[in-house]
Image (cartoon, rainbow, N blue to C red):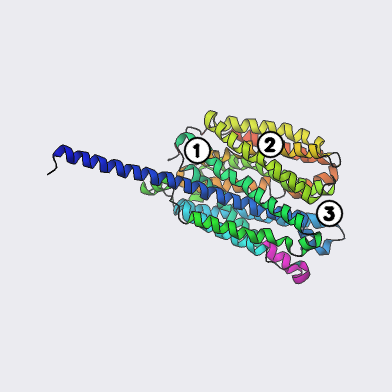
Amino acid sequence: MATGSEASEDVARAGATLAQKAQKVARNSVKQVIAASMVGTAIEFYDFYAYGTAAANYFPKIFFTNLDNDPTVALLASLLTFSIAFIARPLGSIVFGHFGDRLGRKATLVASLLTMGCATVLIGCLPTYAMWGVWAVVVLCLCRFVQGIGLGGEWSGASLVATENAPANKRATYGSFPALGAPIGFFLSNGTFFILEAKLNDDQMLAWGWRVPFLLSAILVIVGLAVRVTMEETPVFKAAMAKHKVVKSPIVTVLRTSWRQVLQSTFIVAVTYTLFYTLATWSLAYGTTHLGFSRQEYLGFLMISIFMFAIFIVVSCNFADRIGRRPALVISSALLVVFAIFFPYLLMAQHETWQVMLFLCIGFALMGMAFGPIGAFLPELFKASVRYSGSGLGYNLAAIVGAAFVPTIATWLSSHWGVRSVGLYLAVMAVCCLVAVLTCRETKNSDYTE
C-alpha cells in the first residue's frame, strides 16, 4: 500500500503531466490561431488587390465598353466600382463586430471569410457588358458590396485572435502575423497576374484570363476555413464571458463611450490605405500609361518591392514592443511626409527602372512601418467587451477615408496637376495620422483583459 508521501508524489507527478499537456495544447492553439489570423488577412489583400489590378487594367474594356471612346472616363468608372467595397466595410464591421463581441471571435471569423470568399469567386464567374449590358455592371457592384461586408469583419477579428493569445510584452509582435498576411496576399495576387501576363496575350486576358485570380481565391478560402473551424476561442473572450462582461449592444456602447478612439483609429489607419493603393493600384496604371512600362514589367517591380513591406512589418512591430506604439507610429508618419514630398521626382522620367524601384521599395518599407503596429495598437484602445466592434469600425472607416477613392482621386489629380499633387495628397493624409497618434495614450503596458 502506498504511503502518504508516495501518494502525494503521485498526485504531484500527475499534476505536472497534466500541466505539461495543457501547456502543449496552449502552444499549439496559439500557433493555430496565428495561422488563422494570417490566412484571413492574406485572402483580404489577395481579393482586394486582384480586384484593384483588374479594375485598373481589364474592367474598363470588359464592363465599361460603352465608354471606350474616352479611355480615361472608362478607367475612372471602373475604379469607382473599386470603392464600393470600402463603403460597405463599416457596415460589415458593425454586423460582424456585434457578433464577435457577443458570441466570440471564432464563429464570426468563419462567417466573414465565407462571405468574402463567395463574393470574390462570383466576380470571376460574371458575364461581361457585351453579354448582359448594364446588368453586368449592377451584379459586379453587388458582388463588390457583399465582398466589402465580409471584409468589414475580417481584420479586427484576425488581430484579436493573434493579440488576445499573446504574452503581454509581445502583443505587437503577435499582431505582426495578421499584418504579414497583407504582403503574402499581395504577392500571390501579383504573382498570379504576372504568370498570366507572361503566358497569355491581351485578347486571351480580356476573354478569360482576368477571371483566373478570382476563381483561384477559392483555394485560399478552403485553407482558411480548415484552419479556423478547428481553432480555440481566445482566452480574453473566454474570460469576458466568464465574468459576464459581454455587452448587449457593442456598437452602441462604442459610439457612446469610445467615439474619440474610433476617430483616432480611423486617421491612424487611413494613411496606410492611401499609401498602399497609391503604390499598388494608381502607380501600376500610371507606370503603364505614362512611364512606358508593360504591365508584366511593373508587376515584376511590385513583386520584388513587396518584400520590403514584409520586412518592415516585423521590424516595426518589434520596435513597438520595445519602446511603445506611439513612438513607432510618430516616426513612420513623419517619414511618410518626407517621402510624399520627394517621391514625385522619381516618376518623371520615361522607363527609368531604378527610379521606379526606389519609389516602390521606400514606399513599401514605410508602409510596413506604418501598418505593422496597428494590429496591436487599435485593439488596445478599446475595452475587451467592445474591442471587435471598436477596432473594426475605426479600421473600416479608414478604408473610406484613406482608400475608397484613392485610385480615382490620384488618377484625376495626376491627369490635371501632375504627380506632385498625388504627393501632396499623401502628405496631407500622413499629417492627419501624425495628429491622431499624438492625441492617443500609450497602450504598450495596458491591461488587455479589461
In the displayed orientation, state which residue is furthest to the top.
323
The amino acid sitting under disc 1 is Arg
Region in magenta: 129-142
Q: Nearer the viewer, mark 1 or mark 2?
A: 1
> With 292 as the anchor, is 383 left or right in this view?
left
Which residue lies at the image location 62% right of the left edge and 61% below the top edge? 119
Q: Earlier in the sequence, mark 2 or mark 3?
A: 3
The amino acid sitting under disc 3 is Thr
Question: From where the camera sits, is residue 140 visible?
Answer: yes
Please tell me in which quadrant of the rendered image residue 266 appears: top right
Task: Determine which of the numbered discs, if any, sits on residue 72 in the image.
Answer: 3
List x then y, in percent, for residue 422: 78, 41
Task: Determine which of the numbered discs, if any, sits on residue 430 in the image.
Answer: 2
Residue 300 painted magenta: no
In the displayed orientation, state which residue is furthest to the left.
1
Q: Earlier in the sequence, mark 1 or mark 2?
A: 1
Give the Cα separation between the discs numbered 3 and 1. Answer: 45 Å
In the displayed orientation, state which residue is furthest to the bottom.
131
Give the Cα separation between the discs numbered 1 and 2. Answer: 25 Å
Residue 137 painted magenta: yes
List x then y, in percent, for residue 131: 76, 71
Which residue lies at the image location 66% right of the left edge and 59% below the top edge? 214
Most foreground residue, 110 or 274 = 110
Specify the quadrant that holds the C terminus: top left
> With 274 as the anchor, is 107 left or right in this view?
left
In the structure shown, which secondary structural element does the residue marked by tag 2 occupy? Answer: helix
Which residue lies at the image location 76% right of the left edge and 60% below the top edge? 205
Q: Disc 2, disc 3: CB below 8 Å?
A: no
Q: Look at mark 1 in the image and give the residue it sits on.
A: 171
